[in-house]
Image (cartoon, grey):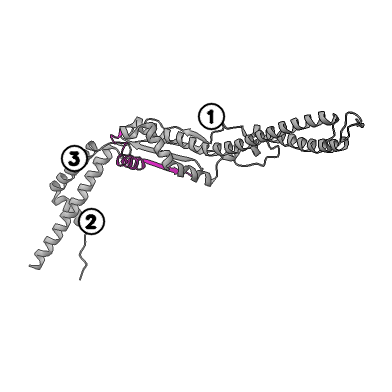
Amino acid sequence: MATPGFNLPDIIETVRKHMRLIFVVSFLSAVAAAIFYMAGPRMYEGRTEFLVRNPLYGDRSNLYNADTRIFDYFADEDDVNRILLLAESDIVRSQVIRNMRLDYIYKLDGATRKGQLATERRYNKNLNVTRTEYKDVILSYADTDPELAAGVANEIVRVVGEVYSGYYKDTKRFMYQSIVNKCHEEDSTIASLTDSLSSLRNYYGIYDIISPARNNIMLSSMKENGHKDYGRGVEIIQNLESIKDQVVYDRAKNQTLQNQYSTGLKDDEMPLIKVVTPAKNPLNAKGIGGMLTVLIGALLGFFFSTMLMSLSDHYFSAAVKRK
């Protein structure tokens, strides 16, 4: 027994036989698609593209080390992954929503948790972040307002760069502040040792430089001054001088470190994101155009009406044969 089916001649015959009905259904489908396109909101997509710098390029060891090893100035995969994480994180989302007043624009109550969640859901739905094989990042934001779409996309990149750079700058600030605090401690220690040595020298009448840390460099020969504790005074002063010289030496090294760690701490220094294509107001709506939408609607109407008519003719002819 032959397996029932459809072939091209049968389909052509069906189209010829029901041409008027198929044409009407196709026309109505095209009209419905046009109405759907005109009535539906048109989404515009603001698209920006940027590169990520290697955070190590601003590190103190690379800036002040004469034997700096060669490294890639572009961020590696881990750094790009961190950028993708930050772009969709709450710290960036909340700041962008607040800066752009999206809750007010979307007519949502940002003062309530329900309104905040609704704004965040809409924000997440409109945001798209991807990366390419060249390690650059493409960020897009869609909205019915083309100007808003471009503005939000650019603002997201700005906030991401601010947060990402701020993480490294804050870490450097913590190290810098620790060194500053240590320098203050050393200043207090030097001042205290200076006062103590001044009093001891006046008490024992010893004004020679007698410090092992200075390799016993003396500006004058040491002679007995008649003080009954002259020997004890020499030992005490020598010990304190050694301690003070070492603290002064450490203070000088820490001062150098302090100056080095202060490099790049300003907000406008050593940015880690380079925008290569800023988002601009899109002229065309996102998705397929109106003509293509109407054409697809007409084709779908033609296809389904043809299939229904073919099925109807097939089962009708089969029923006639059985009789």
Which callout, 1 or 3, points at the residue further toward the start of the chain? 3
Image position, residue 172 (x, y; %): 58, 37
Find the distance from the CA under tag 3 to the CA under tag 2: 28 Å
Report if the CB atoms under discs 1 and 3 are less than 8 Å apart. Answer: no
Closer to the camera: disc 1 or disc 2? 1
Image position, residue 252 (x, y; %): 72, 33
Report if the CB atoms under discs 1 and 2 are less than 8 Å apart. Answer: no
The residue segment tinted magenta is: 105-133
**Residue 8 got which mark?**
2
Q: Between 110 and 237, which is closer to the camera in this rendering? A: 237
Mark 2 Cα-neighbour bin, 10 Å: few <14, some 14–19, many ≥20: few
The magenta stretch spans residue 137: no
Residue at 20%, 48% in the rendered image: 302
Left or right of 146 on screen, residue 155: right
The magenta stretch spans residue 114: yes
**Residue 31 got which mark?**
3
**Residue 200 got which mark?**
none
Asked whether residue 213 appears in the rendered view, the answer is no
- Quadrant housing residue 238: top right
Find the distance from the CA under tag 1 to the CA under tag 3: 55 Å
As shown in the figure, which amino acid type bears the numbered disc 3?
Answer: Val
Tell me the quarter of the image containing the C terminus. Answer: bottom left
Mark 3 Cα-neighbour bin, 10 Å: few <14, some 14–19, many ≥20: some
Residue with the mark numbered 1: 268
Helix, strand or loop at disc 2? helix
Which callout, 3 or 2, points at the residue further toward the start of the chain? 2
